[in-house]
Image (cartoon, rainbow, N blue to C red):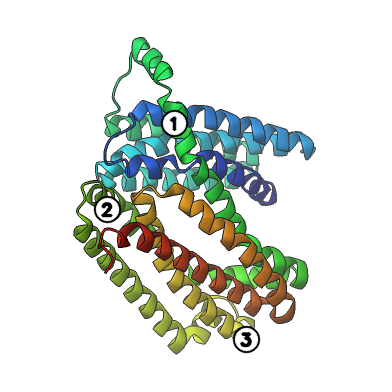
Amino acid sequence: MLGQWSLAVAVSTPVFLFTNLQLRVAQATDAEHKYHFWDYMSVRFPAVVLALLTIVVVATIGQFDSELFAVLMIYSFGKAFDWIGDICFGKLQREERMDIISRSMMLNGAFSFVAFILLLGFLNRLIPAAIAYSSVSLLVLFLYTVPKADIPSISLRGIQDLIRSRSSLRLLLLTLPLGFVSALSSLAGYMPQYQLQHHAGTAELGIFAAISYLSFAGQTVTGALGQAASPRLSRFYAGGDFNSFRRLLGRLLFIVILLAASILVVVLLVGRELITILYSPEYAQYETTFITLTIATGILFCASIFGYAVSSIREFRGQLIVHSINLPMTWTVSAVAVPIWGARGAAGSMLAGAFILCMGYGWILWRRMGGRDAMG
């Protein structure tokens, strides 16, 4: 049953990542309020419908059985509710009301997990558990997120004006590169694992995935920092206050570098003992992989902050260029390194990808800000 659930997640996630178009990023960094809340929602609604139709086509081509198809669609409808709520999050994030976003995400995450586990345990059936999981997304959206977001009302005339203004089309064209960025980023992130599974098997992949989870746990912190700072960075840039932009970016980088260095020190001192205690003694031989992944994580922390800064200046096409370079480079490194060194090669591939992203985003910021004497 959990295999069916995992497959449902694996099938729907890439589709939703692409059609998501990172509208929340564009919304949160829209410091000049060029687009209305309903502009973003008018793009999100058709994108969600397209995602659901695409998933139906994929399931049909894949000849999924009736139960798997039902689980896939139930889960996908839950994700659809989450993506609608994501536009509410974008509004709240631009207003720096991160506390409401945090509570909504905690309510959704906690109750959906508990509902899923309880029904799966008591009924031993996946479909009721999936319904409960997705129902929580619906309830949290309409009972908590929407009321707290203070969504502006819109009349029939407003909808007609929205259609005539073609602002939704302009927004779609603006954010379309971010859809490709999400897809390319996801592929590049999983590329070393694809190579590892192909050349070393699922057992080696499982060990690598377990170690990776420990190494990348700190990304939650960097994500929270970046999301909280994005609206302010965007306002600084739009208002021409480039010195404040630089200072805030510098403080964020200092925090994540300090976090990365602290994690690396712990891994260097007790990394072998840590993975042995958490997993099993056989993991001790992967200490070098653990260290390499931790270094890659530290560079990714910086790349993540640079990425939020790049989004805050709305340089979306530049991100597409960086990720278009990163994917083939990561594939090349992993195709060479993984057959020779296995998990260590996969970790090295992730290190190379992190370095490319960090340098690429750094170059975009230097190019955009250097001309304004804000980066030096």
Cα separation between marks 1 and 2: 23 Å
Task: Identify the residue position indicated by label 2 in the image.
Answer: 233
- The quarter holding residue 108 reads top left
Q: Amino acid at mark 2?
A: Leu
Report which residue position mark 3 lands on: 285
Which mark is first along the chain, 2 or 3? 2
Query: What residue lies at 49% left-to-right and 41% top-to-bottom?
Result: 21
Crowd rating for badge 2 (residues with CA inside 10 Å; few <14, some 14–19, many 20+): many
Which amino acid, by three-letter code, is at mark 1?
Arg
Q: Nearer the viewer, residue 3 or 26?
A: 26
Q: Secondary structure at mark 3?
A: helix
Residue at the image point whose x is 58% and y is 56% from the top:
324
Q: Report how far apart the C-alphas of labels 1 and 3 lie in the structure.
A: 53 Å
Distance between mark 3 and mark 2 Cα atoms: 43 Å
Q: Which is nearer the eye, 297 or 249?
A: 249
310 horizontally vs 9: left or right: left
The relative height of residue 318 versus residue 30 in the rendered view (above or below) is below
Q: Earlier along the polypeptide chain: callout 1 or callout 3?
A: 1
> Can you say which quadrant of the picture contains the C terminus?
bottom left
Q: Secondary structure at mark 2?
A: helix
Q: Report if residue 221 is visible in the image.
A: no
Residue 366 - label: none
Mark 3 packing: few (<14 Cα in 10 Å), some, or many (20+)?
few
> Which residue corresponds to mark 1?
170
Badge 1 marks a residue whose secondary structure is helix
Up/down of 15 relative to 37, above or below: below
At a point 58% along the width and 60% down the height, the residue shown is 325
- Residue 49 in the figure: left or right of residue 158: right
